[in-house]
Image: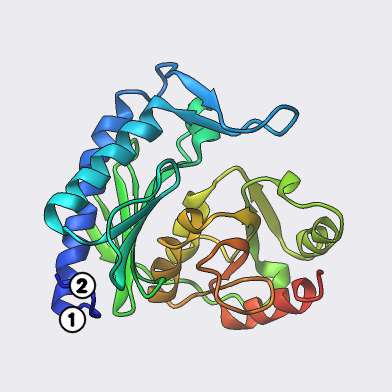
Amino acid sequence: MDPDRTPTPEELEDCATFAVAVLEEAGRAALAYFRRAPAVDDKAGAGAPFDPVTEADREVERLVRARIAARFPGHAVLGEEEGVGAGSGRVGWTLDPIDGTRGFLAGFVQWGMLLALTVDGAPVLGVVHQPYTNETWWGTARGSRFRRGGEASAVRVRPCPEPGAAILASTDPHLFAEAEADAFHALRRAVRLVRYGSDCYAYCLLASGQLDLVVESGLGPWDVQALIPLIEGAGGVVTDWRGDACAAGGRVLAAGDPALHRWALERLAAVP
């Protein structure tokens, strides 16, 4: 596929098939470390919150980069652990080898592997794989799908225009500071239920119609780019806290129902 032009719908389907297969292969590599006390380093500086990277993160990123280079030479790859790789065309890939490394280290299953295909920096395909539960989600503008073993189906967000009926998720309430925290807790008090600790898994559940809002801050592009086509393909909305594109990361607001997104945005957009 030419890295200097937009992929055709048929090429995008081929890329989806490739990306699903690569993440499922990489998932088997990650499981060799899961709940087995992998070696871990702290990427944070002295006095900063713990920011782990494990042997599993590094092995998965190397594997996925190698598969992309073999299949799509000339495509750039942006990964959380190794930065930007070879390639300078319009088409590229963004990779988070393990989104939710803290949960991975603790033995929780709410983590996943993220791979996005981008054109001019905008994600057009997103794939998420959770190898322990054997679940895979992927999405494009043509729709989003789910597979677990022999089960395969389309996924769709659910209608939920009323905040009082909504389920909200966020990885950690300590993501937010000062005005961010005030705005988040205003949302928290207005919804029916709040759950924490899910990382990328919460966005997959939103796309599948299981919850209604995800609110986060401090994300990198590798944290969110695969999730954007997945949620939009399922009928949801993903923006930053001002309603703009969020492919660069930062503050992210995802909602299944557009009316609920507008309600949340009214309460987040004023945060400086």
Three-letter code for the amino acid on which mark 2 is drawn: Leu
Q: Does 218 sit above or below residue 64?
A: below
Measured as percent of width and height from the top left, residue 3 is found at 22, 70
Does the CB distance between marks 2 and 1 fall below 8 Å?
A: yes
Q: Which residue is mark 2?
A: 12
Q: How many marks?
A: 2
Q: Is residue 57 left or right of residue 271?
A: left
Three-letter code for the amino acid on which mark 1 is drawn: Thr
Q: Is residue 217 left or right of residue 256?
A: right
Binning the other alpha carbons within 10 Å of mark 1 as few (below 14), some (14 to 19) or many (20 upward) gives few
* Quadrant of image for the N terminus: bottom left
Q: Is residue 107 left or right of residue 168?
A: left
Check disc 2 and report its element: helix, strand or loop. helix
Measured as percent of width and height from the top left, residue 137 is found at 33, 58
User: Residue drawn 76% across and 59% down?
Assistant: 188
User: Residue drawn 54% across and 31% down?
Assistant: 52
Q: Residue 86: which quarter of the image?
A: bottom left
Q: Is residue 150 visible?
A: no
User: Residue drawn 75% across and 76% down?
Assistant: 269
Q: Nearer the viewer, residue 115 or 130?
A: 115
Q: Nearer the viewer, residue 125 or 7?
A: 7
Q: Does 78 sit above or below residue 25?
A: below
Measured as percent of width and height from the top left, residue 102 is found at 55, 33
Q: CA distance from mark 2 to mark 1?
A: 6 Å
Q: Is residue 28 visible?
A: yes
Check disc 1 and report its element: helix, strand or loop. loop
Q: Residue 126: which quarter of the image?
A: bottom left
Binning the other alpha carbons within 10 Å of mark 2 as few (below 14), some (14 to 19) or many (20 upward) gives some
Q: Nearer the viewer, residue 100 or 81?
A: 81
Measured as percent of width and height from the top left, residue 227 is found at 44, 62
Q: Which residue is mark 1?
A: 8
User: Residue drawn 30% across and 59% down?
Assistant: 76
